[in-house]
Image (cartoon, grey):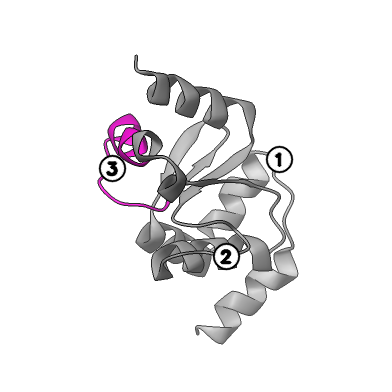
Amino acid sequence: MSDAQTQIKETVESNDVVLYMKGTKDMPQCGFSSRVAGVLNFIGVDYTDVNVLADEGIRQGIKDFSDWPTIPQLYVKGEFVGGCDIITEMTLSGELDTLFESNGIAYDKASAEKIREANA
């Protein structure tokens, strides 16, 4: 396992929620990363952000780690959940709420409902 793979494995296993993204949760550097970070920020999820633009090894390594070709990538309790389209669908369907609840991840359910109402 490469150093990047080891670092990624340790990060996703030692943090409840991790978002590999372009930029940071406070300053996303692409629209897709901005959308996922925006959802997590809006619903108050405490998560670790990893800026793939800061390290080419991590940028390619996360794609290899998950066998998923795009960024952002969301992990919950060490498990890969998906990218922007999947997280958007899960948010709108309520599946993301269920995932967080079943894993004991705190979030603001009222804010999650506001996202669904605004997109109804």
Give the secondary structure at mark 1: loop
Mark 3 residue type = Trp
Element type at marker 2?
loop
Q: Quadrant of residue 80?
A: top left
Could you classify mark 1 by the number of other residues whose Cα lies within 10 Å: few (under 14), some (14-19), or many (20 or more)? few
Q: Position of residue 95 (x, y in %)?
A: 51, 56
Front of the two marks 1 and 3: 3
Decide: few, some or many residues near mark 2? Use Cα within 10 Å; few <14, some 14-19, many ≥20: few
Q: Is residue 46 above or below residue 38?
A: above
- Give coordinates of residue 87: x percent, y percent: 45, 58
Among the two numbered marks 1 and 3 on one chain, the one whose residue lies closer to the N terminus: 3
CA distance separating discs 2 and 1: 27 Å
Q: Position of residue 113 (x, y in %)?
A: 65, 73
Task: From the image, tell me which residue sits under label 3.
Answer: 68
Which residue is pictured at 47% across the width and 34% down the height? Answer: 79
Q: Quadrant of the N terminus?
A: top left
Q: Which residue is mark 2?
A: 27
Residue 70 counted in the magenta span: yes
Give, as a single range, the part of the protein colored magenta.
59-72
Q: Describe residue 31's horizontal placement relative to residue 68 as left or right.
A: right
Secondary structure found at label 3: loop
The answer, for residue 93, to whether it is visible in the render is no
Residue at 63 percent of width and 26 percent of height: 14
- Inspect the image, locate mark 2, and give the three-letter code of the amino acid beneath it: Met
Disc count in the image? 3
Query: Are the residues at dot 2 and dot 1 in contact (C-beta closer than 8 Å)?
Result: no
Q: Quadrant of residue 110?
A: bottom right
- Is 90 or 70 nearer to us in this picture? 70
Q: Which residue is mark 1?
A: 104
Can residue 97 be seen from the camera position used here?
yes
Q: On the picture, is 89 further left or further right than 116?
A: left
